[in-house]
Amino acid sequence: MHYSPGAPILHSKDLVNWEYVGHAVPSLDWGNKYNLNGARAYVNGIWASTMRYRKSNGLYYWLGCIDFGTTYVYTSPSPSGPWKLGGKINTCYYDAGMLIDDNDQIYVAYGNSKISVAKLSSDGFSQVSTQQVFTTPSSIGTLEGSRFYKRNGQYYIFMTKPANGQYVIKSSSPQSGYGSAFQVLLNLKSPVSGSGIPHQGSLVDTPSGDWYYMAFIDSYPGGRIPVLAPITWTGDGWPTIQTVNNAWGANYRYPTTPVNLGSTTGKDSFSGTSLGPQWEWNHNPDTTRFSVNNGITLSAATVTNDLYWARNTLTKRIHGPQGTGTLELDFSKMADGDRAGLALFRDKSAWIGIARDGSTNKVQYVTNVNLSTGNGWPTQSTGTVSASQTVSGSKVWLRIKADIAPGGSKTATFYWSSDGNTFSQLGGGFTMNSDWQFFMGYRYGIFEYATKALGGSVKAVSFTTA
């Protein structure tokens, strides 16, 4: 959505263990609101998108509709990049699913309730034609989130009923001839306590010919998380989930021999001169105001008292169901009026960090940092200092423990340390917001902003997650 770089890509060899490898959209180049420059783009930008590999030219294609207006197409020889803009299509392929046919023709299924299929040009950068192929009957309601497949000569469009169902239509032709929708699931019990119903997502076939359905479940306050189940096919060609006791199973046989590609947790010392692909900025960053060199230096990029207007807030998803993030922060070069630290970042946020006023440094726990739900997500409140303590020295360790399990306490606690070994809790627990409207779950956010004048900076020496 509004995080940059956009469209994170993960890689797996077994559909269970995953690693971040890159982003299909290097920068959100769609106007100043994506730069926090006079406007903001919270919950705008990239919604459901699609990516496929095209064997004929050795390129990966990614496309997505931005702001319900224009579809952007990016390509790369590798999922890890470099990705570049290939074309812009003046049709919104809403919740799109791409198919590259056996004859190398690219098709895109898209739409809400009225589902269409577009045929693209030979390079994939423009539209040749589009045709509505299905209208969702009132007995079902709304269908969207199209994914497009071909199996045994039949074309399949796999669609979700938000947020509790999954349906599929099929035809022997890509742009016509689709019949009634087949119900794949409706109100199927989730394998994760307290979560929503599995839906949306994609079908995946393995080299050995097995099929799986990777759906997502609303799992707030953590966001949406994937769940995986095997798929079989009926004699007349419809996909069927292998359920366990009429529910999505909590355990299934591994798709293949497990391949662990490394952990998404652990210590990141920001080695080298670039960020790893697990990191994303809140909106596009001001690249003149940060540098990576065995640690990341954040120079104040915005004069504001509002975290949601502060540029260069660096974010990372929380690894649940209970996550801990610890920031080692050198604040020796902060300026009078600066605020820097570690945020629990979403539409209802809180942070722990250093506030420098004059020559006094305080570690503060700030709550009530809120956006208003609705058009534009305006700031509702910029924060209340719930606890504060004077600190000395030039370095501090800041820690957030967050229970993001949907069936858990949904509470976060905030800690600080002067030596990195002994931590003290500051203030009470923070109850996270579990509403779905912001879509994304809570993230860790590392920030530095000025309330008086630019000129100060901090250095994030390391960030450790568990």
Image: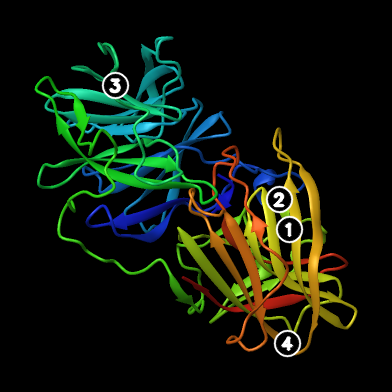
Above or below, 169 against 139 in this view is: below
Q: Which residue is mark 4?
A: 394
Residue 173 visible to an observer of this rendering: yes
Contact check, label 1 and label 4, Cβ < 8 Å: no
At horizontal 31% and vertical 56% (from top left) the residue drawn is 11
Nearest to viewer (mark 2 / mark 3) = 3
Residue pointed to by mark 3: 183
For badge 1, the amino acid type reads: Ala
Q: Earlier in the sequence, mark 1 or mark 4?
A: 1
Q: Report the side of 197 relative to 351 (left or right).
A: left
The residues bearing labels 2 and 3 have C-alpha atoms spaced at a distance of: 43 Å
* Mark 1 and mark 3: Cα distance apart in space: 46 Å
Q: Quadrant of residue 116?
A: top left
**Is mark 2 in CB contact (under 8 Å) with mark 4?**
no
Q: Categorize mark 4 by other alpha carbons within 10 Å: few (<14), some (14-19), many (20+).
A: some
Give the residue type that dot 2 points to: Leu
Q: Secondary structure at mark 4?
A: loop
First in residue order: circle 2 vs circle 3: 2
Residue at 45 percent across and 62 percent down: it is: 277
Find the distance from the CA under tag 4 to the CA under tag 3.
60 Å
Residue 226 drawn above or below residue 354: above
Depth check, front residue: 230 or 121? 230
* Whether residue 78 can be seen here: no
Amino acid, disc 4? Ser
Q: Which residue is mark 1?
A: 310
Q: Which residue is mark 2?
A: 36
Q: Quadrant of the N terminus?
A: top right
- Numbered circle sitting on residue 120: none
Q: Nearer the viewer, residue 207 or 139?
A: 139
Q: Looking at the image, which is closer to me, 450 or 251?
A: 251
